[in-house]
């Protein structure tokens, strides 16, 4: 079985308020997207409306899943998906 790839997903809802984003977080988590990443046994919180998922699916399939999930909250969300080669680096993320 192939190793799962890590994807970082950013979603922007247009004309949204904080309750819309709370709803988005719940729906994205139910669809398998997490709001944290782990390195060296430490869990870090991702920026608002940014998610992580590990999957064998393609980048297009992950984008479609994120878009279709976000559309349940607001129409026409902006979605960016980046597939990781296994190495992710960050700065300033808070421990969860």
Image (spheres, rainbow, N blue to C red):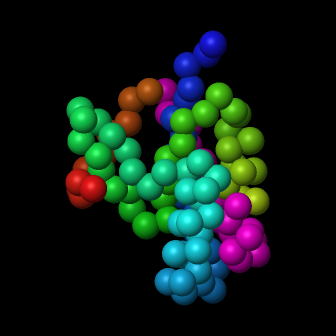
Tell me the magenta residue range: 69-85
In this rendering, the answer to whether 25 lies above or below 57 is: below
Question: Splitting the image into 4 quarters, where does residue 47 fall?
Answer: bottom left
Residue 27: percent from left, percent from top: 62, 64
Question: Outermost residue toward the top?
Answer: 1
Q: Residue 81 at x, y = what percent? A: 60, 48
- Is 56 situated above or below 50? above
- Which residue is painted at 54% across and 43% down in the image? 53
Residue 45: percent from left, percent from top? 33, 56
Seen in the picture, residue 21 relative to 36 is either above or below; the reply is: below
Number of numbered discs: 0
Location of residue 60 by image quarter = top right
Mark yes or no: residue 93 visible: no
Residue 55 quadrant: top right
Please name whichever residue, 21 or 84, is drawn nearer the observer in this view of the structure: 21
Report whether residue 40 is seen. yes
Q: In which quarter of the image is the N terminus?
A: top right
Seen in the picture, residue 75 relative to 39 is either above or below; the reply is below
**Residue at the spot x=70%, y=61% of the render?**
69
User: Is residue 68 shown left or right of residue 37?
Assistant: right
Q: Where is residue 74 in the image (x, y as percent from the top left)?
A: 71, 77
Looking at the image, residue 66 sits to the left or right of residue 90; the answer is right
- Relative to the observer, which residue lies in front, 66 or 12? 66
Q: Magenta segment: does it hold 46? A: no
For the C terminus, the quadrant is bottom left
72 inside magenta stretch = yes
């Amino acid at each position: 079985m192939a190793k799962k790839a890590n994807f970082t997903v950013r979603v922007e809802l247009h004309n949204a308020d904080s309750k819309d984003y709370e709803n988005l977080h719940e729906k994205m988590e139910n669809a398998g997207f997490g709001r944290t990443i782990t390195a060296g046994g430490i869990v870090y919180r991702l920026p608002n409306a940014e998610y992580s998922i590990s999957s064998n699916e393609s980048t297009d399939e992950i984008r479609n899943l994120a878009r279709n999930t976000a559309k349940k909250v607001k129409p026409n969300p902006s979605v960016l998906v980046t597939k990781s080669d296994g190495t992710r680096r960050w700065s300033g993320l808070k421990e969860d």
